Image (cartoon, rainbow, N blue to C red):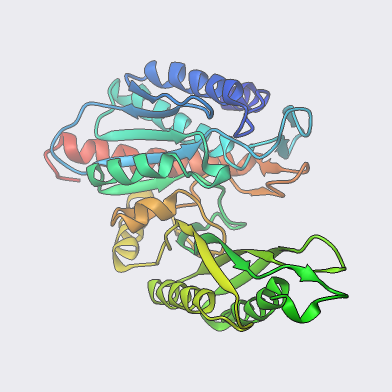
Amino acid sequence: MHYFNDLKTIVDINSYTKNKQGVDNVTTHMQLWLEELGFNTKLFKKEHIGNHALFTTSKKDGIKILLLGHNDTVFPPNSFEGFKEDKTWVYGPGVCDMKGGNIVALQALRNIYKQNNKIFNIDFFLVSDEESGSDDSKLISAKIAKDYDICFDFEAAGKNLEVVTSRKGVGTFTITCQGKASHAGTSYENGIDANLEASYKLQKLVSLTNLELGTTVNVGKFEGGIGANIISSKATLLLEVRFKTINEKQRVLKELKNITNTSYVKGTKSKLEGLIQREVMQENEKQHELINQLEIISNTKILTEHRGGVSDANIFSSCKVTTLDGLGPYGLYDHTINEKALKSSFKKRIDLMTKILLHYQNMERNNGKA
């Protein structure tokens, strides 16, 4: 199975998000392989992060499909590197998140090209900053989303090869509380305690969590003051919000503003900064219709699951593209030095995607008749 050799080639390259040279090296390999199949390459060149790459084919009337992946990983140089394998598993940074998924997509495209000697209406977008929040690439994603009817994201599959139909939205925010410094011993009463203000806000923020609705608010970092003998003049709260529905997002954002603008300690002032990094990927009827079609096409039962983590599928889903995620191989322990992916799941995923993509090629070739 030569695709494991290709996987080794790109896993052996460190592509930590901030390692521009490494990420670009992975992109170059993918570019060479895809151009062999007739794809054209558009690079979105970046100075401090790897280049994003959109690989395109010729277009005809009919359904336009985007395959989605990312080339970056979370591991800095010399922390976790190199590809290994045994009879059952492959090991290394990105084997499941998500260089393994990129190889699944590539091999399915190779299979189609081998049968038809041409690919059309299928593009492949590979970003370089997914692991750090896609702060740069999400602007490109939102712009190109209008060009596609279906998006298949090749993040890792579930344990039973489930595809992902729902992911929480996520946002990161900072609340800065401003008080007034004074000597805690000689003029305690003249101070305005920013730390105390932040402590009240922390409790209010955490109370926004609603586990039944899948909403969490986590204050992950609290900083304030400069010493035990000084009333704190400044405190900051770094927090993350996650939500399953648009209604919950709106509720939490409204309350964040209310909590920020309320002074629980007289004389304090506070400022809210931050943004929603990825909108919610909310399960919808179009996904169910697509899955029903795919089950007929592939003669395979397709299981689904919801995930609390986010991916670039969130972006395309929020742009009203019918999106399915988790079409890569099954793996374990991603974002750790024990990351591994199940070898047998690669073939199953490649076979599934070959059948699906080939169906759409043949359907358009036959003027829309399956």
Work out which quarter of the rendered image holds the N terminus and state it: top right
Q: Nearer the viewer, residue 268 or 121?
A: 268
Vertical placement of 159 versus 244: above or below?
Answer: above
Q: Nearer the viewer, residue 257 or 206?
A: 257
Quarter occupied by residue 361: top left
Residue at 52 percent of width and 65 percent of height: 271
Q: Nearer the viewer, residue 96 or 259?
A: 259
Residue, far front: 186
Vertical placement of 305 versus 265: above or below?
Answer: above
Q: Is residue 175 visible?
A: yes
Residue at 64 percent of width and 37 percent of height: 95
Quarter occupied by residue 81: top right
In the rendered picture of this protein, how many numbered marks are placed on residues? 0
Residue at 84 percent of width and 63 percent of height: 227
Quarter occupied by residue 3: top right
Q: Nearer the viewer, residue 77 or 186?
A: 186
Q: Residue 53's spot in the image, x, y percent?
A: 41, 28
Q: Residue 100's spot in the image, x, y percent?
A: 58, 36
Residue 202 appears left or right of 246: right
Q: Is residue 306 visible?
A: no
Q: Residue 189's spot in the image, x, y percent?
A: 76, 82
Residue at 19 percent of width and 31 percent of height: 59
